[in-house]
Image (spheres, rainbow, N blue to C red):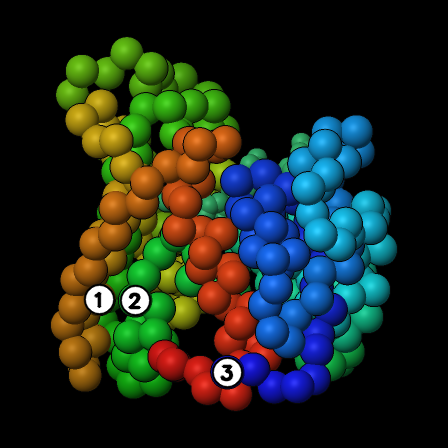
Amino acid sequence: MSSTVSKTVAIAGLGAIGLPLARALDAGVEGLRLIGVACRDPVNARARLADFQAEPRLMSLAELAEADIVVEAASAAAFEQVALPAIEAGRIFVPASCGALLPRMHLARLAQQTGARIVVPTGALLGLDAVRAAAEGPIDSVTIETRKPLAALAGAPYLVQNGIEVADLSEPLLVFNGNAMEAAAGFPANVNVAAALALAGVGPVRTKVRIWADPFVTRNVHTINVDAEAARFSMTIENVPSAGNPRTGRLTGLSLLACLRGLVSTLKVGS
Ligand SMILES: NC(=O)C1=CN([C@@H]2O[C@H](COP(=O)(O)OP(=O)(O)OC[C@H]3O[C@@H](n4cnc5c(N)ncnc54)[C@H](OP(=O)(O)O)[C@@H]3O)[C@@H](O)[C@H]2O)C=CC1
Ligand SMILES: O=C([O-])CC(=O)C(=O)O
C-alpha cells in the first residue's frame, strides 16, 4: 500500500546493488519513479539500461540531488560526492556504503539544518529493528562476527597494510578484531553491516567487530549478539554473494528496495 504522492529516485551505481534496484523501480513500484542514475562508464551504463521501459537519465553524482530520494550504491570513495549535494538540497539520502558515514557524522548535523534525512538501510544485515528498540534502553554490549569466503575479502586495505594473505588459507583465520569505526576504515567494501549495526545501537566505538576469512563458507555470514537490559539476542544471516560482486550479498539490493517502499507506503511493518 503506497500513498498517491509519487517520489522521484536517483541512484549512484549500477552494480550488484544499483542495477537490480533500478530494474525493480523501472518495472514499477507504486509511489516511486526512477529519474536518474550515475556510474563511471556511460557506454556500459547505456547497455545495462537498454531494456528499461523508461530509460533514466545518466547524471553526474551531484546531479542525482535533483531527485527526492538519492540512493548511494557506488563505493565508500564516491560516498561524499553523492551525500553532500543530496543533503545540502534537503533530500532523503539512502546510503549503501554506510561505513563511509561513520567518520562523517557532521553530515547528520548538516541534514538537521537543511531538512534532509539520512536513512540507513538494513542492507545485508538483519535485526536492526530489535537493536534500535534495545537502544532506547541500556545496552551492555553489541558484537558482530562476520565470516566471508576468501574472494570476498581480497584487497581489503587492512589486509594489504598488515601483510595478511588470505588467498591460500586452508583453515579459517581471524583477520580483524576491533571496533566498527576501525573496521569501516580497514574494510570499506566489506563491513557496511557493522556500520549500520553501530548506528542502530551503541555507536562505532562500542560496537565490537570480528572478521574471519573462512575457506569453508560460500556465503557472507554475519552473526550479531546483543546484551541489553530489555533483551538478549543473537541472530545470524547467510547471504548468497551476488553474481557481479562476491563482496555483496544478493539480499542487499532487495533490502534497499524494501527501504524505499517504506518511505512511501501507508502501511509500514517493523520499526
Ligand atoms: N549496506 C550494506 O549492507 C552493503 C553495502 N554495500 C556497499 O554498497 C556499495 C555498492 O556495492 P555494489 O553494488 O556491490 O558495488 P559494485 O562494485 O557492484 O557496483 C558499484 C557501482 O558504482 C559505480 N561507481 C563506483 N564509483 C563511482 C564513481 N566514483 N562515480 C560514479 N559511479 C561509481 C560503478 O560504476 P561502473 O559500473 O561504471 O564501474 C558501479 O556501477 C559498496 O560501497 C559496497 O561496499 C555492499 C553490500 C552490503
Ligand atoms: O556489509 C557489507 O558491506 C557487505 C556484506 O558483508 C554482505 O553483503 O554480506
Q: Residue 75 at x, y = what percent?
A: 61, 42
On residue 174, the disc is none
Check the image and report above or below for 77 versus 223: above
Check the image and report above or below for 149 versus 117: above
Give the structural element (helix, strand or loop) at label 2.
loop
Instruction: Please identify the quarter of the rendering in which residue 236 is found.
Output: bottom left
The residue wearing badge 3 is 1
The residue wearing badge 1 is 226
Between the residue at mark 1 and the residue at mark 2, the CA separation in whole angstroms equals 10 Å
Residue 75 shows in the view: no
23, 194: nearer the viewer:
23
Tell me if mark 2 has few (under 14), some (14-19) or many (20+) residues whose alpha carbon lies within 10 angstroms of its own. Answer: some
* Kind of residue at badge 3: Met
Residue lying furthest top in this view?
168
Disc nearest the viewer among 2 and 3: 3
Check the image and report above or below for 262 versus 61: below
**CB of mark 1 within 8 Å of CB of mark 2?**
yes
* Kind of residue at badge 1: Val
Instruction: Please identify the quarter of the rendering in which residue 117 is found.
Output: bottom right
Q: Residue 62 at x, y = what percent?
A: 83, 53
Give the residue drawn at x 73%, y 38%.
Answer: 50
Give the residue drawn at x 65%, y 56%.
Answer: 26
